[in-house]
């Protein structure tokens, strides 16, 4: 991806096959995003980015922290090479065409853990409302809105607080997980582990099963050799790949064996295409 940083702007010179903000932000990776008058925005940590289309092949991104968002949008990775690899699989071609421009985001780890615990057996509009409510109640107020809370700030939240913010039964999971993250070296240990051991470690957290663990690995740790399986991916497996396995971990293993280090990318394109008739905002 060719880009230049000028003050608070990231200026991209590329075609839409390797960056499409709508496809990227609505592909199930993140929850603090939206569109205002044709301009997409994304909030993460203490920062915000607003993405404007200058021409059909050129984007301009204003942000509070350009270097953060260059990494966040993974602009230093060669997606032409990734797409070439994915196009070797004929069954992916339609989803690659439809989801043209999806990029895998590199998000702050704590933000991903909290968000995807909330996501379990939940729908995206409700997840987004809960996550934003947590930011408004516990995060710092900034010029543009509210930051995602630090672990210290989150540790002040009670089960009742999270219930009032729409987290339901996940409220207790959040309190227990935040306590673990705050009072141990869990995060430092996690980042040093290989994918298999990191998955097992994540499952020690309250509220983290196989699917949520794989989402955290994919979106928070940049492990692309995972394939989160939810209801939609299970449907893809049975409808489009004609699989007969019911166990979701075995379904994930099937896809990882098939797509290897490209698994995370393949998952995003397949997921986005399967949900093409559902509007997220």
Image (cartoon, rainbow, N blue to C red):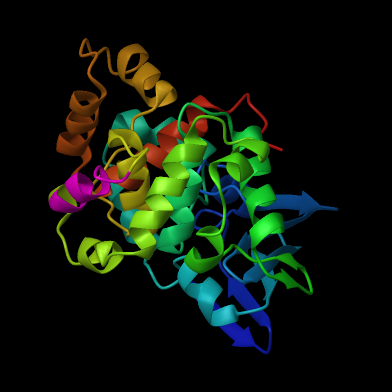
Instruction: Work out which quarter of the rendered image holds the C terminus and state it.
Output: top right
Which stretch is magenta? 197-205
Whether residue 5 appears in magenta in the rendering, the answer is no
Residue 105 pos. (x, y %)? 46, 58
Q: Residue furthest right?
A: 37
Judge from the rendering whether residue 70 lies leftward or rightward of residue 54; answer left or right: left
Residue 150 pos. (x, y %)? 53, 67
Relative vertical location of residue 243 with respect to residue 107 in this rendering, above or below:
above
Name the foreground residue: 267 vs 182: 182
Relative vertical location of residue 8 with respect to residue 266 in this rendering, above or below:
below
Relative vertical location of residue 39 with respect to residue 144 in this rendering, above or below:
above
Q: Residue 137: in sight, yes or no?
A: yes
Judge from the rendering whether residue 83 lies leftward or rightward of residue 30; answer left or right: left
Judge from the rendering whether residue 213 lies leftward or rightward of residue 7; answer left or right: left
Residue under the image location 45 percent in, 64 percent down: 108
Residue under the image location 33 percent in, 35 percent down: 211
Q: Quadrant of residue 92?
A: top left
Q: Residue furthest bottom?
A: 7
State how many labels appear.
0
Residue 237 pos. (x, y %)? 31, 20
Q: Residue 80: in sight, yes or no?
A: no
Name the foreground residue: 278 vs 136: 136
Judge from the rendering whether residue 280 lies leftward or rightward of residue 87; answer left or right: right
Residue 263 pos. (x, y %)? 27, 43
Q: Main secondary structure of the magenta part?
A: helix
Residue under the image location 56 percent in, 48 percent down: 158
């Amino acid at each position: 991806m060719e880009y230049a940083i000028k003050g608070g702007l990231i200026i991209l010179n590329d075609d839409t096959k390797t960056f499409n903000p709508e496809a990227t932000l609505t592909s199930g990776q993140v929850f603090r995003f939206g569109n205002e008058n044709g301009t997409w925005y994304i909030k993460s940590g203490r920062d915000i980015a607003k993405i404007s289309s200058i021409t059909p092949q050129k984007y301009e991104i204003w942000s509070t922290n350009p270097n953060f968002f260059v990494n966040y949008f993974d602009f230093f990775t060669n997606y032409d090479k990734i797409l070439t690899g994915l196009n070797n699989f004929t069954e992916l071609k339609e989803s690659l065409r439809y989801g043209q421009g999806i990029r895998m985001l590199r998000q702050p780890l704590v933000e991903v853990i909290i968000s995807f615990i909330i996501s379990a057996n939940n729908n995206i509009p409700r997840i987004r409302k809960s996550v934003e409510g947590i930011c408004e109640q516990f995060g710092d107020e900034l010029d543009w809105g509210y930051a995602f809370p630090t672990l210290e700030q989150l540790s002040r939240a009670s089960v009742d607080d999270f219930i009032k913010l729409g987290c339901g039964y996940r409220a207790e999971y959040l309190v227990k997980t935040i306590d673990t993250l705050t009072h141990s070296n869990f995060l430092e240990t996690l980042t040093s582990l290989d994918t298999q051991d990191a998955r097992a470690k994540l499952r020690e957290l309250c509220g983290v099963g196989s699917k949520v663990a794989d989402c955290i690995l994919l979106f928070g740790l940049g492990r692309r050799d995972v394939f989160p399986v939810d209801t939609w991916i299970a449907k893809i497996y049975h409808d489009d790949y004609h699989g007969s396995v019911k166990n979701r971990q075995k379904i994930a293993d099937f896809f990882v064996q098939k797509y290897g280090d490209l698994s995370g990318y393949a998952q995003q394109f397949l997921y986005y295409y399967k949900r093409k008739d559902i509007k997220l905002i």
